[in-house]
Image (tube, rainbow, N blue to C red):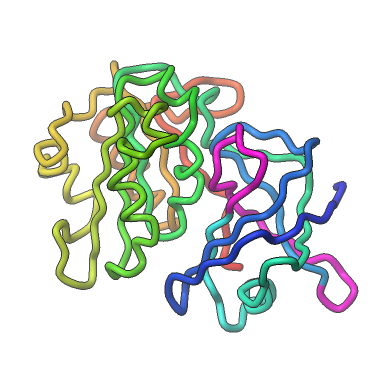
């Protein structure tokens, strides 16, 4: 695996558990929206890398990343201290299942995330191909606390953004939810899907496997919950690198 260095351009800490950073992008690093790279640091004279979704669209000349902070994590305990001008390590071969090539083209694309699982969708909701393939793009994102909805203001106003609004053309929908304190939307995303309240609030048609597709990224428990929802409720087929499906989920992430 070829490893290169990128320079840190910007760092923002949202909470004591979450931070965002932006790095340079080597011209040779090409990726599809929704893919991830290995990223890390040199620790004790050895490279330590973990899988991180690229949170910026593939036409930008920089890369964005969204990370948790694990106090005793071998990587994030050090990565959380980076500052502009520092260097991080990445590989140059992106991979991942959350890409347009693994799904059937359709009416609505549902993006379902918990926690930092929203990172690949931050790329996709700004992706040109996303809106070429689907009429509407609908992001459902759940966190424990309101302050953990790090991109909430940005996503709420995405359709009006002076740059990305030209890409979304008013066809992006956002449903943030919080599970452990009072908020506009509370509870698990699956509950909002089962009872249909999310469709009513967003004024979108209920999921139909013959017309719509879904992507899933979150904890393993959440991934399995949504897998059950789509397969048992709608008899959906999971997509992969060889077969376009009704939904895809990312299984590659572990505690860092």
For the residue pair 130 and 47, the one nearer the viewer reads as 130
Whole-percent x, y for residue 157 in the image: 30, 45
For the residue pair 213 and 168, the one nearer the viewer reads as 168
For the residue pair 239 and 107, the one nearer the viewer reads as 107
Residue at position x 33%, y 50% from top? 225
Q: Is residue 60 above or below residue 156?
A: above
Residue at position x 29%, y 70% from top? 145
Say left or right for 169 vs 201.
right
Q: Is residue 167 above or below residue 254?
A: above
Q: Quadrant of residue 80?
A: bottom right
Residue at the far bottom: name it.
72
Say left or right for 166 vs 47.
left
Whole-percent x, y for residue 61 in the image: 67, 40
Q: In the rendered structure, which segment of residues is drawn in magenta?
A: 43-64
Say left or right for 83 vs 116.
right
Residue 235 appears in the figure: no
Residue at position x 50%, y 71% from top? 13
Q: Is residue 140 above or below residue 5?
A: above
Counting labels gives 0
Q: Quadrant of residue 58?
A: top right
Q: Quadrant of residue 139?
A: top left
Q: Is residue 33 above or below residue 15?
A: above
Residue at position x 61%, y 56% from top? 22
Whole-percent x, y for residue 216 in the image: 41, 43
**Is 71 one of the magenta-colored residues?**
no
Say left or right for 205 vs 6.
left
**Is 62 one of the magenta-colored residues?**
yes
Whole-percent x, y for residue 24 in the image: 71, 50
Residue 159 appears in the figure: yes
């Amino acid at each position: 695996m070829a490893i290169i260095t990128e320079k840190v351009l910007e760092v923002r800490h949202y909470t004591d558990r979450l931070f965002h950073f932006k790095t340079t992008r080597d011209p040779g690093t090409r990726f599809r929206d929704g893919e991830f790279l290995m990223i890390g640091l040199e620790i004790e004279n050895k490279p330590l890398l973990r899988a991180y979704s690229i949170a910026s669209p593939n036409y930008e000349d920089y890369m964005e990343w969204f990370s948790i902070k694990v106090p005793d994590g071998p990587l994030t305990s050090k990565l959380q201290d980076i500052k502009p001008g520092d260097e991080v390590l990445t590989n140059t071969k992106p991979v991942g299942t959350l890409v347009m090539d693994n799904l059937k083209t359709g009416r609505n694309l549902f993006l379902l995330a918990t926690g930092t699982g929203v990172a690949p969708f931050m790329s996709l909701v700004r992706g040109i191909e996303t809106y070429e393939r689907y009429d509407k793009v609908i992001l459902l994102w759940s966190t424990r606390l309101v302050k953990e909805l790090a991109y909430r203001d940005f996503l709420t106003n995405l359709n009006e953004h002076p740059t990305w609004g030209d890409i979304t053309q008013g066809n992006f929908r956002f449903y943030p939810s919080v599970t452990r304190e009072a908020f506009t939307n509370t509870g698990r995303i699956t509950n909002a899907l089962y009872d249909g309240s999310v469709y009513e609030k967003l004024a979108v048609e209920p999921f139909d496997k013959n017309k719509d597709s879904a992507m899933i990224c979150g904890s393993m428990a959440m991934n399995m919950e949504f897998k059950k929802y789509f397969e048992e409720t709608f008899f959906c087929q999971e997509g992969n690198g060889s077969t376009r499906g009704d939904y895809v989920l990312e299984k590659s992430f572990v505690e860092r």
